[in-house]
């Protein structure tokens, strides 16, 4: 199993550009989520999904869109990049929607810089 | 809203000693508390989970305690090794909720 994969590893964008961060898992996990990690701020939840076709907002959803058309994939779209979105982005998955009692499997992260 | 506090200062200890990291929270007690390890440039890796009705959980050299009166969890690494050097994150969640809330993490440095 590859686990949770994320592409790209690094990305530089200009303000106003859009892009999609890819996330895939091959463990047949129901639950997937996106976090951003900034120095001194810890991991903050952007969006999450408890199953295909179902998504919900986390703590910091503004400026980001998600969709979950398959169990395996959970892409994160930046609609119009801003310097405040410079961060490291992590995708995570867990076996079931009962995230409280299931360990989260994290991807390797995408380091995004917005100029 | 729930606030989670982990020591922002790095913890420096000598190899062989026991490292103890703290996770404090405000407001009501979570149903579950998880601990993760994160190495530089990598995603967090799950270590242990403890439920609110459990006082203690062990896994090899790791031990987690959960005190709902003090609103605190302690994470212990016994016989620490330089390879244990990393940032350790605690995360809380509540029954019926589908989200985890993470602390900012504490860096542990184990010197030989």
Image: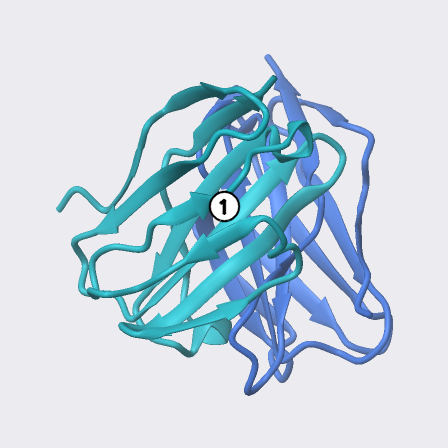
Chain colours: A cyan, B blue
Where does the image place residue B101, in percent across and percent down from the top left? 64, 61
Q: Is residue A34 above or below residue A98?
A: above
> In this view of the protein, which residue sits in the foreground, B18 or B70?
B70
Look at 43% across and 21% down and name the residue there.
A11
Q: Quadrant of residue A5?
A: top left
> In this view of the protein, which residue sits in the foreground, B80 or B99?
B99
Quadrant (top left/top right/bottom left/bottom right) for the N terminus of chain B: bottom right
Please report, as a chain letter, where disc 1 is located: B
Look at 60% across and 78% down and name the residue there.
B54
Look at 48% across and 24% down and name the residue there.
B41
Where does the image place residue B72, in percent across and percent down from the top left? 79, 64
The residue where tag 1 is placed is B61
Quadrant (top left/top right/bottom left/bottom right) for the C terminus of chain B: top right
Where does the image place residue A49, in percent across and percent down from the top left? 40, 68
| Label 1 element class | loop
Where does the image place residue B106, in percent across and percent down from the top left? 71, 37
Q: Along the horizontal axis of the image, is B57 left or right of B67?
A: left
> In this view of the protein, which residue sits in the foreground, A104 or B84?
A104
Q: How many marks?
A: 1
Q: Quadrant of residue A93?
A: bottom left
Q: Is residue A17 above or below residue A105?
A: above
Q: Along the horizontal axis of the image, is A8 left or right of A45?
A: left
Q: Residue furthest left?
A: A1
Look at 47% across and 52% down and name the residue there.
A34
């Amino acid at each position: 199993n590859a686990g949770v994969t994320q592409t790209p590893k690094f990305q530089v964008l200009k303000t106003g550009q859009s892009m999609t961060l890819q996330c895939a898992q091959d463990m047949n996990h129901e639950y997937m989520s996106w976090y951003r990690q900034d120095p001194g701020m810890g991991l903050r939840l952007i969006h999450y999904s408890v199953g295909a076709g179902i998504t919900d907002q986390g703590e910091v959803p503004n400026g980001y869109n998600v969709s979950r058309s398959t169990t395996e994939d959970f892409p994160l779209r930046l609609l119009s990049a801003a310097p405040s979105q410079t961060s490291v982005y992590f995708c995570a998955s867990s076996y079931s929607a009962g995230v409280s009692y299931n360990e989260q499997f994290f991807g390797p992260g995408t380091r995004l810089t917005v100029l | 809203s729930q606030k989670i506090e982990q020591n922002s200062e790095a913890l420096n200890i000598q190899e062989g000693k026991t490292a103890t990291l703290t996770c404090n929270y405000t407001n009501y007690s979570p149903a579950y508390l998880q601990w993760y390890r994160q190495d530089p440039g990598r995603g967090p890796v799950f270590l242990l989970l403890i439920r609110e009705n459990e006082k203690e959980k062990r896994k090899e050299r790791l031990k987690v305690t959960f005190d709902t009166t003090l609103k605190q969890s302690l994470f212990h690494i016994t016989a620490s090794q330089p390879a244990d050097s990393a940032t350790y994150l605690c995360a809380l969640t509540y029954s019926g909720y589908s989200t985890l809330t993470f602390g900012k993490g504490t860096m542990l440095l184990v010197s030989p």
